[in-house]
Image (tube, rainbow, N blue to C red):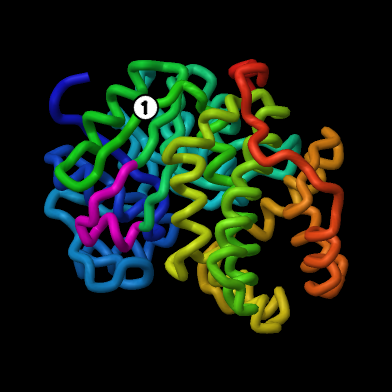
């Protein structure tokens, strides 16, 4: 790849817009693609994504469009920042327009229910001739565009992908680290949304710092245990895409999933909370999928099971908490050199 690239970001949400702004600010010709033509035209004219990042000026050189062919034809690198429920459809749409050596990177944090398929695996299925990667980490879009110092992770088996993304995104306030464990990094981004709901509920119910610390560390243990069974490296969860993203999402009301949990903890019905959010909270959907997969694999995930029973089996929070606290005692640290890392999902 040369110094200046043509880059497309698919998805006009807050994170897609933030990433597109970074790329354009670094001097690359950048397209931000939105499915809604009217919204794309408004953003292009106003030079602002008024719905998701109001008050933030779009960088000069960032071209907002609803024309997918225009956005991705002759593009060197494509970031796909589409919610998980429509991710495959968009990946399939862009296939005929990509040039042969284009890199495609997912930034979505979710799981497709059919086959428990991660977003990057969808890219591999729909775009088998392209190098694929995942960008994930503790990254709130509002803080990125406010020039807060931020770290993220590009995960791919391809060094070409890692190098390209690091070079295109690097700036004085945004740093990208590399990891070969694509599946582990992606699972971290999906799983932490479940625990953000739990932590939001706990905060709303008056839990203190002791409880918060216990929830965060036991959440991390569950994430690593599940990921290890799926073939990822549990040690990945000690990095930015694991514990870093977990801490961020579980301790801030900038997190959609944390806000869902907080409102649930105040007694609001799940349907009301989700419909009033205005954006996708992946954690609710991910909870369904992870609970089913954990049961299938026989993975011990008491926090996942507890939240599932509260949200979908209408069990009282106090009863679930009592069972969790009085359940069988277990070990604290479960990671060891004896954990087998198979490197694939």
Residue 154, visible in the rendered structure: yes
Task: Name the residue at 37% across, 27% down.
Answer: 178
Image x and y of residue 322, in percent:
82, 66
State whether residue 312 appears in this view.
Answer: no
Q: Residue at coordinates 41% horizontally, 52% vertically from top-left?
A: 11
Q: Which residues are magenta?
A: 141-151
Q: Nearer the viewer, residue 73 or 244?
A: 244
Q: Position of residue 69 (x, y in %)?
A: 37, 40
- Asked if residue 146 lies left or right of residue 286, the reply is left
Instruction: Say above or below: 97 vs 305.
Output: above
Q: Which residue is mark 1?
A: 178
Relative to 81, say whether 132 is above or below: above
Q: Secondary structure at mark 1?
A: strand
- Is 277 displayed left or right of 140 in the figure? right
- Image coordinates of residue 155 in percent, x first then y, are 44, 28
The residue sitting at the bottom extreme is 267
Quadrant, the N terminus: top left
Residue 48 lies in what quarter of the image? bottom left
Q: How many marks?
A: 1
Which residue is more in the foreground, 278 or 234?
Answer: 234
- Residue at 23% across, 72% down: 55
Residue visible at 51% across and 27% down?
182
Q: Is residue 16 left or right of residue 114?
A: left
Whole-percent x, y for residue 85 in the image: 62, 51
Image height check: is 309 above or below 273? above
Crowding around mark 1 (Cα neighbors within 10 Å: few <14, some 14 to 19, many 20+) is some
Residue 90 located within the stretch drawn in magenta: no
Viewer-proximal residue among 331 and 323: 331
Q: Magenta stretch: residue 142 in it?
A: yes
Q: Quadrant of the C terminus?
A: top right
């Amino acid at each position: 790849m040369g110094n200046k690239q043509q880059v497309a970001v698919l998805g006009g949400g807050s994170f897609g817009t933030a990433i597109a702004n970074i790329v354009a600010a670094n001097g690359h010709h950048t397209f931000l693609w939105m499915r809604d033509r009217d919204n794309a035209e408004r953003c292009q004219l106003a030079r602002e994504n008024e719905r998701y990042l109001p008050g933030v000026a779009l960088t000069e050189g960032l071209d907002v469009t609803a024309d997918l062919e225009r956005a991705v034809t002759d593009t060197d690198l494509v970031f796909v920042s589409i919610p998980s429920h429509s991710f495959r459809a968009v990946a399939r749409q862009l296939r005929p327009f990509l040039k042969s050596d284009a890199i495609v990177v997912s930034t979505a944090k979710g799981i497709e229910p059919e086959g428990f398929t991660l977003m990057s695996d969808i890219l591999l299925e729909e775009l088998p001739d392209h190098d694929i990667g995942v960008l994930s980490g503790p990254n709130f879009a509002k803080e990125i565009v406010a020039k807060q110092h931020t770290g993220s992770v590009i995960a791919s088996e391809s060094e070409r992908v890692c190098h390209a993304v690091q070079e295109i995104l690097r700036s004085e306030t945004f740093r990208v680290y590399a990891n070969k464990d694509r599946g582990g990094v992606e699972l971290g981004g999906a799983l932490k949304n479940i625990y953000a709901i739990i932590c939001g509920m706990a905060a709303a119910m008056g839990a203190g710092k002791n409880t918060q610390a216990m929830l965060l560390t036991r959440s991390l243990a569950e994430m690593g245990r599940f990921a290890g069974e799926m073939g990822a490296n549990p040690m990945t969860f000690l990095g930015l895409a694991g514990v870093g993203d977990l801490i961020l999402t579980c301790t801030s009301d900038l997190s959609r999933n944390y806000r869902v949990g907080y409102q649930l903890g105040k007694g609001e019905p799940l349907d009301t909370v989700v419909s009033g959010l205005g954006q996708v909270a992946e954690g609710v959907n991910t909870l369904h999928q992870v609970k089913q997969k954990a049961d299938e694999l026989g993975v011990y995930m008491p926090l996942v099971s507890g939240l599932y029973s509260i949200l979908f089996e209408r069990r009282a929070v106090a009863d679930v908490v009592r069972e969790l606290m009085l359940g069988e005692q277990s070990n604290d640290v479960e990671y060891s050199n004896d954990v087998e890392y198979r490197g694939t999902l």
